[in-house]
Amino acid sequence: MALTPKLEFRQSQSLVLTPQLQQAIKLLQLSNIELSVFVDQELEKNPFLERDDGSGDDRREQDTGGREEQNVDTDRIADSTSTTDKTPTSDSSLSEGAALPSSDNAPLDVDEGSLYGEDVAPGRKEEPIPGDTGMDAWTGLPSSGGGFDGGNFGIEQSLGAAETLKDHLLEQLNITFTEPVERLIGVHLIDLVDDAGYLQGDLDAVSDRLGCTPGKVAGVLEQVQTFDPSGVMARDLAECLTIQQRTRDRLDPAMETFLAHLDLLAKRDLSGLRKACGVDAEDLTDMIQEIQALNPKPGLAFGSEVVQPVVPDVFVREKTGDGWTVELNSETLPRVLVNSRYYSQISSAGATREDKAYFSESLSSANWLVKSLDQRARTILKVSSEIVIQQEPFFSLGVEYLRPLNLKAIAEAIDMHESTVSRVTANKYMATPRGIFELKYFFTSAISSTEGGEAHSAESVRHKIRVLIDAESTSAVLSDDKIVEMLRESGVEIARRTVAKYREAMNIQSSVQRRRMKKSLI
């Protein structure tokens, strides 16, 4: 057979992810904070994108921040696999010109199993003061507006910053140490302190990194541990409490032994702790009261990083009649517009070919971003509405009635792929009359029923275990085996190891530890 070059025509089908489609898929899994950051970046680099300030300018082409809501019909609960049309309706704030990408053009619902092998504030301009020439009367130079640094800033524009723990320790470090090497070691140790005031890191690693002896590092640490607040720079809880007792001159041999056996105190083994310390019950009670008066986290008295509160993406409210209303949180939806007028002005002003190509690409990117944001909002509303339909007993009756649910059930009901539902439910929160929950919260595994009926949700079973333990008396502490029996009587088929796993996940102690703790509180 001769080897000769030849031409062949082959016809095949393949799914290609364009950069714009990849961006649209990425937007689905972003949280509201991450989405705001992404939109801010696009506003900076795209000249045809602008933020909607609600002024109603006629330059508006598309708007993605409209309020959308949907009424959920609870009559559809019985048929959870129905594909009844639940496409959310929107008000006039969504422009009719903002057409969604067609399924043939660039759908957001992509089966990636074949792709990746998975199933899955402007400043205020002040009026000039009469007679003010803008020149300093003493130097003849331009006036700085009263600021000390030459800027036009008043004292009302400055904010007081809370002193951090590291700043407080560095001030004491500069006073305590005069040798440069010791200061360098101290600064490095202070950098390893967390918000609670504990030292994170190994001293040997510090000595290797700084090229000094471990004894030198230990000596500096011993002096730094005398800084205010008392107990700072400790490596564990026992050392933190030891430093505070030493500062109060209350560290006798019995107290040292007490602090060395804090594990016995955690287990409520008071008899073993009393035997280890060599004290009677009255002295042990006094020692426990002394420890309870100490601060286990001395660093929290200083300013720390502000925790970002959870902002819900969806609101669920009960209607006056029957059913629930699902509404998007418009505060978390970025409102962006495409300035097509500006594009017409600059593209017809003698622009070069390269400039026109850039303008066209930017305009296309802006239009796609607006449409992608609108599609993201609609998809979130669609998935959230189906979750409310599937978990309606939870919203009406409580967590005990939470049903087993997986991504496949939602995907089949709304005619989407599981990977799309997975992205939509990631980092999204729903505000309900029962609290704020992550959308992933409503997806739980199933636990079979003893009577062959409907399966129970794992989250509802965990709630039942907590209720049983909270209601137990001191004389009748429930063991894991007893909990299994009680759950089986209520129709839940569960193994003992599963009860133990759920109990440990909820940070509930064993029956022995709970019994010992209850007796110590009598």
Image (cartoon, rainbow, N blue to C red):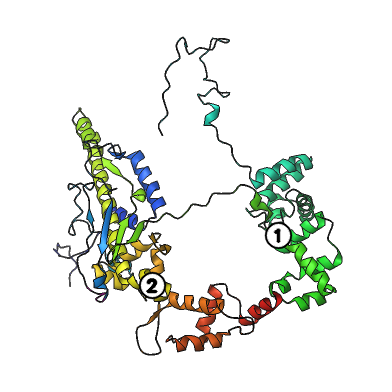
Quarter of the picture containing the N terminus is: bottom left
Q: Is residue 501 left or right of residue 234?
A: left
Q: From the top left corner, tell me how far across and down residue 377 is, in percent.
A: 29, 55
Nearer the observer, 78 or 212: 78
Residue that carries the numbered disc 1 in the rendered image: 235
> Tag 1's secondary structure?
loop
> Tag 2's secondary structure?
helix
Q: Of the residues tagged 1 and 2, which is closer to the observer? A: 2
Q: Residue at x 74, y 40 (%)?
A: 174
Q: Residue at x 82, y 71 (%)?
A: 282
Nearer the observer, 482 or 195: 482
Q: Residue at x 33, y 57 (%)?
A: 28
Q: From the top left corner, tell me how far across and down residue 372 is, in percent.
A: 27, 52
Image height of 202 relative to 122, above or below = below
Image height of 311 relative to 473, above or below = above
Question: Badge 2: how crowded within 10 Å, few (<14), some, or many (20+)?
Answer: few
Residues shaded magenta? 78-82
**Dominant SS type (magenta):** loop
In magenta stretch: residue 248: no
Quick one: label 1 or label 2, which is nearer the N terminus? 1
Q: What type is the residue that disc 1 sits on? A: Arg
Residue that carries the numbered disc 2 in the rendered image: 397
Asked if residue 259 can be seen in this view, the reply is: no
Nearer the observer, 20 or 304: 304
Q: From the top left corner, tell me how far across and down residue 246 is, in percent.
A: 82, 57
